[in-house]
Amino acid sequence: MSSALDRLKNLTNKISSYELTRKNNLVTLRELFVEVGIDKKIDTFEELFLFKAINLSGASLLEENLGEVKEGKYLQVLAISYDKNEKVKSKNTSLAYFGRVENVTCDFKDRVVEFIIRYRFEKSFITLEHYNGMLSDFGTKSE
């Protein structure tokens, strides 16, 4: 009985930790939304999550070389939208363009990379909630 209670406590602590991290992430993400200049292209912060994904050109987003500059490339934040009713289903939209990556300060480039990672972190929670809702429908469909 004690081990079941311990597992429940551990799970509760982990969930609480994720929720606290998520809350703090959203605060910082909202600040970066303005600092990086995405607010000039999108009217509201909430609209950011209507995109299927957001990507970055000019710097790596891979864990093993996060933020590493890709020489000769342009630092640009790209949003990917998807419309199943259009002939061309996927569309890339530039949310911010900063010029040659070598000409951008390292600190600013790092803030742009941080913005993308923080966006993806929150987007993963939104996706998780979406699929959790879809799974809950399976129990009621057979009734």
Image: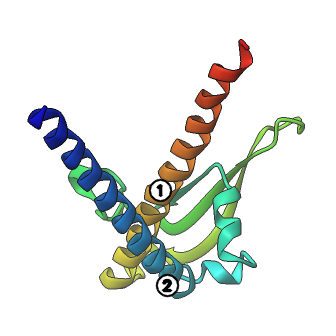
Q: Secondary structure at mark 1?
A: helix
Point 33% across, 65% down: residue: 69
Q: Is residue 7 left or right of residue 86?
A: left
Circle 1 is placed at which residue position?
A: 120
Quarter-wise, where is residue 90 in the image? top right
Residue 56: x %, y % from top left: 49, 60
The residues tagged by marks 1 and 2 sit, at their Cα atoms, a distance apart of: 15 Å
Name the outermost residue toward the left: 2
Point 39% across, 68% down: residue: 113
Q: In which quadrant of the rendered image does the N terminus lie? A: top left
Amino acid type, residue under disc 2 in the picture? Glu
Quarter-wise, where is residue 44 in the image? bottom right
Circle 2 is placed at which residue position?
A: 31
Amino acid type, residue under disc 1 in the picture? Arg
Q: Is residue 125 left or right of residue 21?
A: right
Q: Is residue 85 left or right of residue 140?
A: right
Q: Nearer the viewer, residue 18 or 111?
A: 18
Q: Is residue 58 visible?
A: no
